[in-house]
Amino acid sequence: MLNAHDILETIRMIQDENLDIRTITMGVSLLDCIDPNIDSACQKVYDKITRCAKNLVRVGEDIEKEYGIPIVNKRISVTPIAIVSAACKGSPVQFAHTLEKVSQVCGVNFIGGYSALVQKGFSAGDVELINSIPEALSETEHVCSSVNVGSTKTGINLDACALMGRIVRQTAQITADRDCIGCAKLVVFCNAPEDNPFMAGAFHGVGEPDCIINVGVSGPGVVRAALSKAPDADITEVADIIKKTAFKITRMGQLVGMEASRRLGVPFGIVDLSLAPTPAVGDSVAHILEEIGLERCGTHGTTAALALLNDAVKKGGVMASSKVGGLSGAFIPVTEDAGMIDAARCGALTLEKLEAMTAVCSVGLDMIVIPGDTTAETISAIIADEAAIGMVNSKTTAVRVIPAIGKQMGEELEFGGLLGSGPVMKVNRNSAEKFIGRGGQIPAPLQSLKN
């Protein structure tokens, strides 16, 4: 039962500690829109999404006003377009244009699902869609793309890693006049979840309902503020503080999700517990780690502190809601986190340390700016490394790197808004070309045999 203390505490979290609902994301199945005629298929896609999501933004804004809870983004995710477009003759980019038109009509911030799932191999539709990604992302503003190249069950498609290295470079080159923004809307996964509400990796899985509402919460500032009140706590007490704080954040997310579900007349799916930072001061995962006791994020002890944080967030969240899903943990996107940006600028945080951190955090190498002359094969190898961490540890990992065309280490790339800015980080210059060129499938680990 709510009491005055709980209400006042939540108000303080919102006003002073950057607590918000980062996104409500409506997932829409497009399986019933498949048509051999691409014009007909695109029209069906447009009609269905606009019908389902016509009130999404209004409902989100109404909930914000009535409850006083900021909802930063309203988004849509759809069935991977590679599945929908496979039956059509014509360029998949036509679907990207349709999704862009939908995003503008519905007023959402992003629409995700220009995606392909190729962890065990390619279909003709997958190859066609992946090759179209640079064009699609350069010609749209709100469309996001993702490709799943591996899983614990299937292993890693090394041919897909090789292809995605080239696609990431091409996307950077074709959007170089806009600070390579296309790469900020493209993520490569291992073990991609089907109910992820966060961009750029959101898509609506084929096992999901026809239409559903998922919620992504945030609150790094709230966690840091709670820890700042216990400077002498031992590490077990630190974990307990994080768990209790995550419980409160998750309850707020569930309230918003259930209310949005009721008003829109669609099922409530999951709350994603991920601590999603922003470039705003006081809203940083890195600063939580520093509050735990690190002089600077990236120093020795960072991986251990992040493991504690991630585990405590999950434990607190699952006690608060029986509908926890998505990614759920702590995001470490460099350009989107004020503390990560500072740590990268001063050299405390390196690409190698970030890779180690991804073994215990929510996702992977996220929003990392690399030199513009980084080869496609090196990008492919970064993807393969991250996929291996996900595959062996049975967790989701991802890569969203931005080759800053025309820039070198020490220079900066500026996106603005939630995407932030960041320094160009050092990349190992030794070649992995022969390894990537071997192609084939990296076999699934022994723990995949669970039947």
Image (cartoon, grey):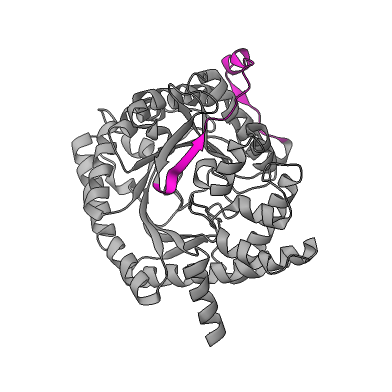
| Residue 123 relative to residue 57: left or right | right
Q: Is residue 427 magenta?
A: yes
Query: How far across and down, in percent of the image, does residue 252 sit?
Result: 50, 71
The residue nearer to you, when weighing 304 against 383, is 304
The residue nearer to you, when weighing 74 against 348, is 348
Any part of residue 223 in sight: yes
Against 150, is 267 above or below? below
Which quadrant of the rendered structure holds the N terminus? bottom right
Against 64, is 325 above or below? above
Total numbered labels? 0
The residue nearer to you, when weighing 90 against 18, is 18
| Residue 199 relative to residue 337: left or right | left
- The structure residue drawn at horizontal position 65% and vertical position 36%, both measured from the top left corner, is 355
| Residue 299 relative to residue 97: left or right | right
Residue sitting at the far top: 434
Any part of residue 200 in sight: no
Q: Does the magenta stretch include residue 341?
A: no
Query: How far across and down, in percent of the image, does residue 260 sit?
Result: 37, 68
Query: How far across and down, in percent of the image, does residue 65 sit?
Result: 34, 73
Query: How far across and down, in percent of the image, does residue 117 sit?
Result: 47, 36
Residue bounds of the magenta highlight: 417-445
- The structure residue drawn at horizontal position 47% and vertical position 22%, both measured from the top left corner, is 372
- The structure residue drawn at horizontal position 40% and vertical position 44%, both measured from the top left corner, is 416
